[in-house]
Amino acid sequence: MNTNHARSTLAVYLLITIIGTLSSLHAAVIEVASTSGQKMNVEIISHTASSGNVRIKRADGQFFNTKISVFDAVSQEKIIANAPKELPDFTFDVSNGRQRARQGNSAYMQEMTISTSVKVENRSRDIDLDQTNCTIVLVGRNAKRYANRAYDWYKILSVQKFSTKLVAGKSSEHELKAIETVYDQDKDSSNLGGWEFEGYLLVAQDEEGNVIATKTSLGQVGITTAKDPKAVLAAIALSEGTETNDDLTPRGR
């Protein structure tokens, strides 16, 4: 492994560890009671809704793993309200299938059907993925660029949405509506244009609308747009048919 990369990875790991430690140090101390009436003051380190697992820190500094069911109803409400809201380790696997066919008797005009499927996997062992709303933007590129580079811009071919909610260790699969486009496949000065499928931008948002993850196969979008939540929200708000620059900002703006 590259030394600089290893140092960078270690620094990020240490930063995450420090942040997590500080968060636990400043967690609120609450009084809870077991179903038998035994009371104690604790900090809630984590709570997993799907399994009912709770990790607590007692006033004496000891950590314990238990089930939320051992506490009375009022305490359970306190635990849920005071548990840190952690984002699980979840990933996207996007698959784009392409089927080409000649348009009529043409030797150069191609009809392309693009099918898209998305697999969402919650890799966390003890953190559930709450309601997550996803938007995928499928993008085409002007084929006329082969004849004239001045025509090199993009177009929103499709904007589709789906939602998921995953307990720790589970996954979900989503088949999206297939779309069609037509373009001239000749890569020379005779090219008549059309829109060749170029790639996608996939965005995940929490229930409040905050961007919590992005994935893209579009180079410039990954370099610039995906790093700016405002630009991401603007991109997924575009209408189908909008012509854009390579960073998905509308042309002429």
Image (cartoon, rainbow, N blue to C red):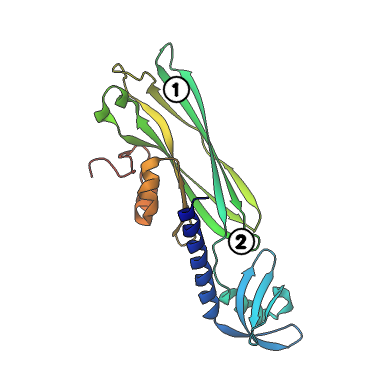
Task: Report the residue at 55% width, 72% height from top.
Answer: 84
* Residue 47 pos. (x, y %): 63, 70
- Image coordinates of residue 194 in percent, x first then y, are 35, 25
* Amino acid beneath label 2: Asp
Q: Which mark is residue 111?
A: 1
Q: Is residue 216 visible?
A: yes
User: How many residues crowd mark 2 within 10 Å: few (<14), some (14–19), many (20+)?
Assistant: many
Q: Identify the element where label 1 is drawn.
A: strand
Residue that protrudes farthest toward the right in the picture = 36
Mark 1, Cα crowd under 10 Å, few <14 / some 14-19 / many 20+, is many
Q: Against 199, is 84 above or below? A: below
If the image is split into quadrants, where does the C terminus sit? top left
- Residue 53, horizontal then vertical, whole percent: 69, 69
Left or right, 156 with respect to 179, comes to left
Q: Nearer the viewer, residue 163 or 7?
A: 7
Residue at 55 percent across and 66 percent down: it is: 86
Q: Position of residue 208 (x, y in %)?
A: 46, 62
In the rendered structure, which disc, 2 or 1, sits on the residue that comes first in sequence?
A: 1
Q: CA distance from mark 2 to mark 1?
A: 42 Å
* Label 2 residue SS: loop
User: From the viewer's perspective, is residue 104 above or below residue 54?
Assistant: above
Numbered badge on residue 128: 2
Residue in the image at 67% along x and 82% along y = 62
In the rendered structure, the answer to whether residue 35 lies left or right of residue 2 reads right
Query: Mark 2 near mark 1, Cβ–Cβ under 8 Å?
Result: no
Give the answer, above or below, for where 198 lies relative to 59. above
Type of amino acid at the residue the image marks with label 1: Glu
Q: How many marks?
A: 2
Q: Nearer the viewer, residue 10 or 87?
A: 10
Picture residue at 38% right of the left edge, 56% below the top: 229
